[in-house]
Image: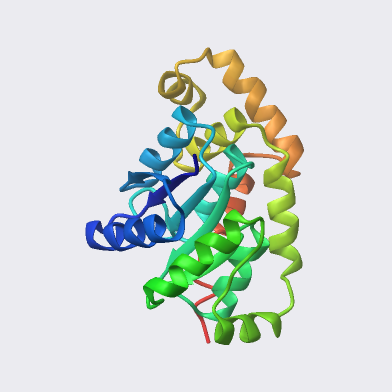
């Protein structure tokens, strides 16, 4: 049975996505989450989820941070980004960070269903007009490089990195993840090495680069 996760904080849009999913895939199981934490919990509880429909802006996720978290912690799940911010540069960055496609929130039910079918068939999907604009943009080497470095982290290391980005100390991270502080220190050392940074400040700068502010400038 095909399993889909819809991660969006708007109930009406989740309902629209659920309807499109049910119409595009016979007998699919649809799970819903209203924030990034719920989406990550759902994936941890059900590693057989085939596809995630991910809103870029919801509680716990701003910009590309949610996409990076999903791709870093659950690399086998395909991700279709769903967003009202459909500027070509934003879409290009999402693709560079591992999205299998991009659905504008203005997309029709037929387009959403087509996107789901294509990605479940191991393909990719963009609306025709948007595809042409995105194809004209080169991949940003900085985004490609960062996506590659983040992909080197283990699931637990990504969790530690996210908490570092919130400004938590090692002891606080240990308490949050219910692990020992010395384990956190070992993870932090490995994170710095894999990301090529020397300290928490530099790691935080890398995380903040996932913000979409630059992508939304003309």
Total numbered circles: 0
Residue occupying the point 57% across, 72% down: 91
**Residue 22 versus residue 133: which sits nearer the camera?**
22
Side of 14 where 36 appears, left or right: right
Say which quarter of the image contains residue 33: top left
* Picture coordinates of residue 43, whole percent (x, y): 47, 36
Residue occupying the point 66% across, 32% down: 154
Tell me how the rendering is colored.
Answer: rainbow
Vertically, is 82 above or below 135? Answer: above
The outermost residue toward the left is 12
Vertically, is 180 above or below 193? Answer: above
Say which quarter of the image contains residue 190: top right
The outermost residue toward the front is 26
Vertically, is 46 above or below 146? Answer: above
Residue occupying the point 42% across, 68% down: 83
**Residue 95 versus residue 125: which sits nearer the camera?**
125
Instruction: Decide if residue 24 is in sight here.
Output: yes
Instruction: Decide if residue 84 is in sight here.
Output: no
* Picture coordinates of residue 79, whole percent (x, y): 55, 54
**Residue 159 versus residue 185: which sits nearer the camera?**
159
Residue occupying the point 69% across, 28% down: 189
Side of 82 where 189 appears, left or right: right
* Picture coordinates of residue 116, whole percent (x, y): 51, 60
**Residue 31 versus residue 91: which sits nearer the camera?**
31
Vertically, is 54 above or below 49? Answer: below
* Picture coordinates of residue 53, whole percent (x, y): 45, 55
């Amino acid at each position: 049975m095909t399993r889909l996760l819809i991660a969006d904080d708007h109930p009406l849009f989740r309902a629209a996505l659920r309807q499109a999913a049910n119409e595009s895939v016979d007998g699919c199981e649809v799970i819903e989450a209203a924030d990034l934490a719920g989406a990550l919990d759902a994936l941890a509880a059900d590693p057989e989820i085939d596809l995630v429909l991910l809103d870029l802006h919801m509680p716990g996720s701003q910009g590309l941070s949610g996409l990076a978290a999903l791709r870093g912690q659950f690399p086998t799940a395909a991700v279709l980004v769903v967003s009202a911010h459909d500027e070509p540069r934003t879409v290009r960055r999402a693709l560079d960070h591992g999205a299998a496609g991009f659905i504008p929130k203005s997309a029709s039910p037929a387009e959403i269903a087509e996107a789901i079918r294509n990605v479940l068939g191991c393909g990719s999907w963009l609306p025709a007009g948007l595809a042409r604009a995105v194809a004209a943009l080169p991949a940003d080497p900085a985004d490609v490089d960062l996506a590659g470095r983040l992909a080197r982290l283990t699931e637990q290391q990504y969790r530690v990195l996210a908490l570092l980005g919130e400004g938590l100390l090692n002891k606080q991270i240990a308490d949050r993840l219910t692990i020992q502080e010395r384990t956190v220190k070992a993870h932090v050392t490995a994170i710095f090495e894999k990301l090529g940074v020397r300290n928490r400040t530099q790691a935080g700068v890398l995380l903040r680069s996932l913000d979409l502010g630059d992508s939304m400038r003309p």
